[in-house]
Amino acid sequence: MELEISSMAFANRNIEVEASMGEVENSLDGMPINVNVENLNFYYGSSQALFDINMRIPARQVTALIGPSGCGKSTFLRTLNRMNDSIVGARVEGSIRIDGEDIYHRRTDLVELRKKVGMVFQRQNPFPKSIFDNVAYGPRIHGLSDKRKLAEIVERSLTKADLWNEVKNRLNDSALALSGGQQQRLCIARALAIDPEIILMDEPASALDPRSTAKIEDLVGELRKQYTIVIVTHNMQQAARVSDFTAFFYEGELVEFGRTKQVFTKPGKKQTEDYITGRFG
C-alpha cells in the first residue's frame, strides 16, 4: 500500500525528532562534528519553511540532502552560511554552531563565515573575467595582492578541482569560453581558493551532461579527504554514490538522517522508504 502523507504523519513531531536524533547519535560513532544544528526554524515572512531541524554534520564527510522539490533542502543548505540573510522577511530561530560558535550571533562576521563555508551553486556562474582572475578573486578581496602567492593559490585550487591540466596554458582566457562542466569545476576551484573548511553544493551537477557529472562526483570523492561537504541533490543514485551520510527532508521537516547505506537499504521511517522506492516525490 502506497504511503498516504498527511499532516497526521507529523503530528508527533517532538517524538519524531527525539527518535531521529537517537539514530544520528548511534550513526556518528564518536566522529568530530563540524556543524551542530539545534531546533532550527526558518521563515520567509509569515510562511514557515523549516520546522525544528536538529542535525549534527560530521567533519570531512559528505552529507547529502535529499527530498522532493520544495521540501526545504536548499533553504536549509543556505542557512549554513547565512545566504538567506539578503531575503526580505527571512527569519531564523534556533542555533547553528560551526566549530562551537553560533553563526547567527549578532557579532558574527559574515565575510569570515563565508570564507570558512564556501558555496557552489546549481548553475555554473563564473565571473566574466579570465580563468586566473576567477580563482584569484576571493584571495584578492581578502587582501592578498602578492602575485607569486596568488599564482600558487590559483594553481593549487585548479589542481584540487581537477582542472589545472586542462587550462594551465590559457589562464588569461575568458572563463566563459570553458565548457559547462569546466565552468562548474572552475567555480569549485574559486570556492577552494579561500581555503574553506566546509563546502556547500546546491545540485552542482544538475545542469551537466553525464560525463561532466561523473567528473564532479569523482571530485567530490577526492575533496572529502580535506573538507566537510554538504550537497543537495535531486538524484538519489548520486546521493548513494557520493555521500557518507544522507538527510531526507519532506515539507520542511527532517524525516531521517543517518549513514547513507542505512538510509538507502534499511530506512528507519516509512516516509523515507516510500520516497526512495519512488512511491511519491
Image (cartoon, rainbow, N blue to C red):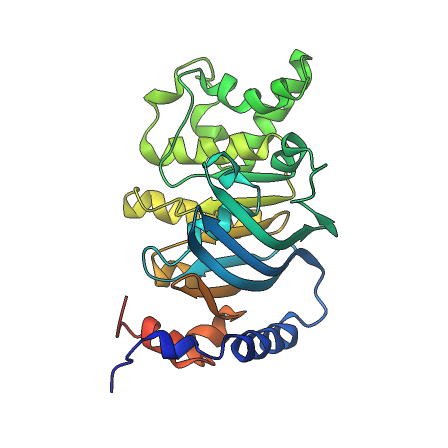
Q: Is 272 left, or right, of 116 in this rendering?
A: left
Write the residue at 53% across / 57% down: 41
Write the residue at 53% across / 64% down: 245
**Which residue extends farthest front?**
46
Q: Is 248 left, or right, of 154 in this rendering?
A: left
Where residue 35 sits in the image (x, y, percent)?
Answer: 65, 54
Where residue 253 sits in the image (x, y, percent)?
Answer: 45, 65
Q: Is 162 left, or right, of 117 in this rendering?
A: left
Where residue 212 sits in the image (x, y, percent)?
Answer: 34, 42
Relative vertical location of residue 247 with respect to residue 221 in this rendering, above or below: below
Query: Which part of the image, by quadrant, shows the C terminus?
Result: bottom left
Is residue 77 visible in the rendered structure shown here? yes
Q: Nearer the viewer, residue 69 or 28?
A: 69
Query: Which part of the image, by quadrant, shows the N terminus?
Result: bottom left
Is residue 243 visible in the rendered structure shown here? no
Relative vertical location of residue 63 with respect to residue 139 in this rendering, above or below: below
Location of residue 18 (image quadrant): bottom right
**Which residue extends farthest bottom?**
1
Relative vertical location of residue 95 with respect to residue 272 in this rendering, above or below: above
Relative vertical location of residue 173 with respect to residue 182 in this rendering, above or below: above
**Which residue extends farthest right?**
100
Write the residue at 68% across / 52% down: 97
Q: Is 197 left, or right, of 43 in this rendering?
A: right
Q: How many marks?
A: 0
Q: Nearer the viewer, residue 69 or 239?
A: 69
Where residue 242 sits in the image (x, y, percent)?
Answer: 46, 58
